[in-house]
Image: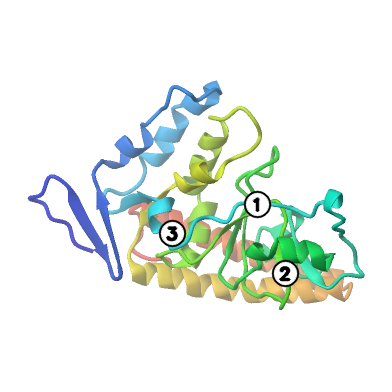
């Protein structure tokens, strides 16, 4: 990562990623458009949270880190004679599948083939990040796709695909206090219980070194192994084994999030 201290604008390089940063951290978060409706949007707690970010790191809008646009949500439509049911073969991923430690692989919905053909643009890929953008209590929930079937699509969830930074880090960042505070602030700045594609693209992402991003990926995968064991146990009806593994996975993910937040605040050098 390089900074030209003599330039009026700063250039930051992060391996293959180069971004320009023209504002200070708090300047980026201090933009308060007059169109914001909810008084909670102006709550100073958001600035207080974001002021904890170490000055060693820089931020860019998510939009600048995308190689393809965010895939907007759609859903199965009965009006088009599309259906959901166990007799169909296409996995249909919705909000219920976004568990804290990963996707729900034990209780999967399926949709008709004509629905899949219309929603084919949302065919899942390994590494996709699913983002809930509507519903009180649901906005800001995210999911990481670590495995897919040959036929799968998404209902009412945004898809963030192939970012220019480590997608495991991006996913964990969205779960941190710094990611969730921004999502909550956006939510309080709109009239209805929905977040739009441009609003998600506005979320500022903190650029930490690539080696730390890779360590976050490795730690996430360790946690994910327990999540998978929990899903297998749940599918077999083994409640005790499910509880043991899901609790281990939840503890590990909470610790990883806390360590990532500490790195962002400059309180520790790495998550390992």
Specify which label sits upstream in the sequence, 1 or 2.
1
Q: Please say if the residues under marks 1 and 2 sit with CB atoms less than 8 Å apart.
A: no
Quadrant placement of the N terminus: bottom left
Choose the circle earlier in sequence order: 3 or 1.
3
For disc 3, the marked residue is 66
Identity of the residue furthest to the left in this view: 6
Image spot of residue 220 (x, y percent): 54, 70
> How far apart, in angstroms, are the residues tagged by discs 1 and 2?
14 Å
Q: Is residue 200 left or right of residue 49?
A: right
Q: Residue at x 43, y 66 (%)?
A: 271
Coloring scheme used: rainbow
Q: Position of residue 253 (x, y in %)?
A: 58, 63
What separation in Å lies between label 3 and label 2 (alpha carbons)?
22 Å
Q: Nearer the viewer, residue 168 or 20?
A: 20
Up-down: is 238 above or below 84? below
Which image quadrant for residue 64?
A: bottom left
Q: Quadrant of the C terminus?
A: bottom left
Q: Nearer the viewer, residue 30 or 47?
A: 30
**Residue on which disc 2 sits:** 152
Which residue position holds label 1? 73
Report x, y in % for residue 201.
Answer: 47, 48
What is the C-alpha distance between the residues marked 3 and 1? Answer: 17 Å
First of labels 3, 2 by sequence position: 3
């Amino acid at each position: 990562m390089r900074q030209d201290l003599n330039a009026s604008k700063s250039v930051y390089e992060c391996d293959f990623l180069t971004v320009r940063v023209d504002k200070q951290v708090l300047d980026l978060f201090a933009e308060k458009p007059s169109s914001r409706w909810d008084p909670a949007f102006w709550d100073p707690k958001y600035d207080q949270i974001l002021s904890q970010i170490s000055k060693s790191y820089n931020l860019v809008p998510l939009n600048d880190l995308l190689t393809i646009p965010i895939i907007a949500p759609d859903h199965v439509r009965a009006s088009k004679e599309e259906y959901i049911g166990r007799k169909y073969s296409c996995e249909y991923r919705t909000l219920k599948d976004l568990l804290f430690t990963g996707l729900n692989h034990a209780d999967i919905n399926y949709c008709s083939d004509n629905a899949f053909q219309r929603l084919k643009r949302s065919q899942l890929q390994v590494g996709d990040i699913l983002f809930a953008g509507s519903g009180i209590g649901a906005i800001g929930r995210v999911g990481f796709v670590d495995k897919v079937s040959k036929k799968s699509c998404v209902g009412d969830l945004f898809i963030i695909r192939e970012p220019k930074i480590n997608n495991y880090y991006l996913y964990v960042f969205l779960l941190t206090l710094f990611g969730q505070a921004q999502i909550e602030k956006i939510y309080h700045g709109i009239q209805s219980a929905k977040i739009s594609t441009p609003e998600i693209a506005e979320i500022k992402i903190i650029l930490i070194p690539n080696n730390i991003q890779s360590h976050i990926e490795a730690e996430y995968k360790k946690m994910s192994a327990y999540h998978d064991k929990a899903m297998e146990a749940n599918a077999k009806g083994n409640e005790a084994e499910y509880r043991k593994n899901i609790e281990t996975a939840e503890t590990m993910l909470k610790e990883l999030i806390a360590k990532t937040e500490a790195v962002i605040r400059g309180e520790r050098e790495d998550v390992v």
